[in-house]
Image: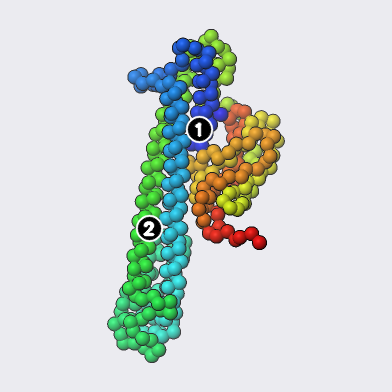
Amino acid sequence: MAITGPASYIPTMNAFNSQWEAANALLGASPYIVRLSDGNTTMSRAQFVTLIGTLQTQQNTVQSCLTQRQVARGVINLQKAALLEMFALFVSVLDGYFRNTEFYALRPVAPSLSDGQEAFSRPLGRVITLWAQINNGPAPAGITLPLELSDETTQGSFASAVSALQFAYAMEDTKETLTGLARAKRNMIQEQAYEAMKMYREGARNAFRAFPELLITLPRLTPLPGHTPEPVNASAIFEAPASAKVVYDASDDSMLQRYELRGNVGEDYNDEDAVVIATNGPGAAREFVTPFGLNQPGAQVALKVYVILTTGNEAGSGALFVQRPVSVPLAA
C-alpha cells in the first residue's frame, strides 16, 4: 500500500501497524519508538493505533457533514420546486387578468430550478412587490382582492416562503462551512500520520538491522516506479432496502493485488472526500454490496472501483452514482 490520497491513509497505516506489531515482537523488551522530526516528540505503536482510530473517526465525521449538507440541499430543492409552482400560478393570474396593465409590463420570467440563490430569488422578489401593489387595487373583473391563489397562497405566505428559502440557503452555507472544518481537521491528522510513517521508515535501517525480514517488508509511502493499470468497467444499482450493489469487470493486469470500492456521500465523486468502503481480492466475486451513505430516503452516493497493483499504482473506474428512492415500493 502507498499514500495516493486521503482514501489511502487508513489502509497504509494498517500496513505500518501490522509491521510495527511484528517488529515489537522481535525486539522484545525494547519496542520500536518513532522519534518525530521536531526532535521532542516520540510515538509508540499504541499511540499510532490511537491515531488510526482518530483518523477513521474524522473520516466518518466528514461523511456525516456531507450527509447533512446533502439534506440541506434537498430542503432547498423542495422549497424551490414549491415556489416555482406558486410562481406559475401568480403568472397565470397576470396572463389571464392583467394584460394591458403596468403589472403585466413587469411580468417576471420564471427562474430555473438549477439557478443559484441570487438568480433564483430575484424574480421571486419581483413577485412579492407586484403582488403587494396588485392588492392595493383596483381589482379587475374576475379577481377578488387581496389576491389569493387557487392553492390558498397569499402574498404574505409567498413572501414567507421566499424568506424561508433564504434561511435554507444560510443553513446550507453553515453545513458547507462545517464540512470544510471537518476536512481541515482530517487533513491535520493525516499530516501527523504521514510524519509518523515517514519517521518509522527513517529509523528502520538502524532499529531493524538484526532483522532483515523487517527491512524487506517495510511498508511504502509512495508507489514503486511502474505502470498505471487500466481501469475496469463498473456499474451500480440501488438494492432495497438501503444498499448499493456494484459489479465490475476483471482486471487482466499481472500485478493486480486487489480491488477497492471507494466513495463519498453526495452527487459528485470527490477524491478528497472519498474513503475506502470495501476491498476484494483478485479471486473474489466481482461485486460489492454496501449500505454506505444510504441511511435515509433520498440519500445519494458517488462510487468508484479501483484497481490496485502490488507496486501501489492504481486506477479508478468511471464514477458511479446511486440514490436511495424517497419511498421504496412494497414487494407484491
Residue 281's tag is none
Q: Secondary structure at mark 1?
A: helix
Q: Residues within 10 Å of mark 2 (few under 14, many from 20)?
A: some
Instruction: Please say whether residue 205 is visible from this viewpoint.
Output: no
Residue at (42% x, 47% y) in the render: 65
- Pinpoint residue 37: horizontal percent, then vertical percent: 39, 21
Quadrant in the picture for residue 146: bottom left
Label 2 close to label 1 by CB (< 8 Å): no
- Pinpoint residue 142: horizontal percent, then vertical percent: 40, 89
Outermost residue on the left side: it is: 136
- Pinpoint residue 94: horizontal percent, then vertical percent: 41, 81
Vertical side of 35 occupied by 267: above or below: below
Q: Which one is nearer the viewer's eye here, 297 or 260? A: 297
Mark 1 is on which residue type?
Ile
Instruction: Please say whether residue 240 is visible from this viewpoint.
Output: yes
Q: Secondary structure at mark 2?
A: helix
Give the mark, 2 or 1, whose residue is nearer the N terminus. Answer: 1
Residue 10's tag is 1
Quadrant in the picture for residue 80: bottom left
Quadrant in the picture for residue 225: top right
- Pinpoint residue 258: horizontal percent, then vertical percent: 63, 33
Residue 169's tag is 2
Q: What quarter of the picture does the C terminus occupy?
A: bottom right
What colouring does the structure picture have? Answer: rainbow
* C-alpha separation, residue under disc 2 versus residue under disc 1: 34 Å
Q: Residues within 10 Å of mark 1 (few under 14, many from 20)?
A: many
Vertical side of 127 occupied by 238: above or below: above
Mark 2 is on which residue type?
Tyr
Residue at (66% x, 32% y) in the render: 256
Residue at (67% x, 41% y) in the render: 286
**Mark 2 or 1, closer to the camera:** 1
Tell whether 251 sits left or right of 293: right
